[in-house]
Every structure is written in structure tokens, then in C-alpha cells.
Amino acid sequence: MDTENAQRWPRYARSQRVLHWLIAALVLGALVLGGTIGWFGFEGLQERFGAAGTDRIYTWHKSFGVLILFLMVARVGLRLRHGKPPYAMALPRAQRIAAESVHGLLYVLLIVMPVIGWWATAAGGYPVQLGPLFLPGLFPENEALSEVLFGWHRALGIAITLLALGHIAAALHHALVRRDGVMQRMTFGGYRS
Ligand code: HEM
């Protein structure tokens, strides 16, 4: 790595970049599987994919969500440890505030969302799964509360989708239009001079 360029184009620590892309892939998977569940509903899924297929969709969805929760905790730890690199070129104030708000909300929602999913699942008397493992429910059964929490889970799914789309659009704008090194803070390729 070229030290002069590394100073000119500062980046997040490698561990932070790895977690960013891993969590991004898992969130995409959780949203697609969750969206499929929401779209078809339990009975619709059974008609279309059969009992075993439906079971797999739920298990994969819950597993992705639980992994997101664990990885997000690690990510917050890494952020506290390594902080955030400076920008190569100062961002206009409004853009900086918008970026920080979206990033902050994504951090909070990607922790709150899986906790609500876990809580709603356990409160409904369903198993909390990570692949073949059955994790402790942690929350007592309460059917009425489970329904309310699944309502929140749905609303937050929409909020996360919108925030993620805004985040991706901004990243592409920096990479393709402004070409100001912002995207490279989170990528792995060589430095541009
Ligand atoms: C960031 C992580 C997560 C995301 C983005 C996410 C997203 C979603 C979305 C969009 C839906 C569809 C909601 C609807 O339209 O009704 C859904 C449903 C569901 N999620 Fe999650 N989820 C996450 C984590 C979890 C976790 C950790 C669990 C449990 C361990 C879980 C359990 C469920 C269940 C059981 C449903 C189906 C609810 C129903 O049958 O009405 N989710 N999720």
C-alpha cells in the first residue's frame, strides 16, 4: 500500500470494512426474505413453497437477523475503538449532517430491528433460530404483545429499506459523480491518485 496515498485517501480499518459489507449482504437477505414473508403471509408461503420451504424461509430470515444483531454489536465496538477516518475533501455542512443522521439511524435500527424480531418471535411462542441452533427466547410469551411487535417489525422494515436506498444512492453519487474518495473509505481496491 502506498503510504502517501493512504494518507490522502483515508479509509476505515479493514475489520470495519469487512463488517460493513458482510452486514450489508445480510440486511439485503433479511429484507428480501422478510419481504417475501410479508408479501405472501404464512398461508400464502405454504401454498407456494410447501411446509418445508416455508420453514426454511423463516429459519434463514431469523438466522440472518440474529447474525446482524451479533455483528452490529461487534461493529459498534470497532467503531468505538477505531473511530472514523477524516474525509479527503471536506463535505458541505448539510451533506455531513444528512450523512451522519442516516448512518446514526442505520446503526440504531440495525440493532433495534433484530431485537424486536427476536422479542416478537419469542413472545409469540415461536423458536428463535440461528441455523440449526435454537437460541433462548429470553422474553416471556405474550401473544398480544407479539402482534404489536410484529407490527413494529414491519414498519421498521420499510424505514430500513428507505434509509438503505438513500445511503446507496449517496454512495453511488460520491463514487460516480463527485469522485471525491468517499466511496473508497469503505472499499478494498487500490488507491486512486
Ligand atoms: C435487521 C434484521 C431484520 C430485518 C431487516 C428484518 C426484516 C423483516 C421484514 C421486512 C419482515 C416482513 C414484515 C411484514 O411485512 O410483515 C420480517 C418478518 C419477520 N421477521 Fe424479521 N427482520 C430482521 C430480524 C429478525 C429477527 C432477529 C427475527 C427473529 C429471531 C425475525 C423474525 C421475523 C419473523 C418471524 C417474521 C414474520 C412475521 C410474520 O409472520 O408476520 N426478524 N422481518
Image (cartoon, rainbow, N blue to C red):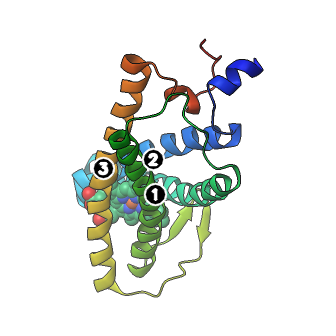
Q: Position of residue 156 (x, y in %)?
A: 31, 60
Look at label 1 and name its amino acid: Leu
Mark 2 CB near ligand 1 (8 Å cut):
yes
**Residue receiving disc 1:** 110
Residue 76 visible? The answer is yes
Task: Read off the residue under disc 2.
Answer: 27
Q: Residue placed at 64% from the left, 17% from the top?
A: 191
Between disc 2 and disc 3, the foreground one is: 2
First-in-chain label (2 vs 3): 2
- Residue at image point 54% right, 64% down: 129
| Quadrant observed for ligand 1 in the rendered image | bottom left
Q: Which residue is mark 3?
A: 35
The residue closer to the viewer here, 29 or 92, is 92
Of 118 and 93, nearer the camera is: 93
Location of the N terminus (image quadrant): top right
Q: Is residue 23 above or below residue 113?
A: above
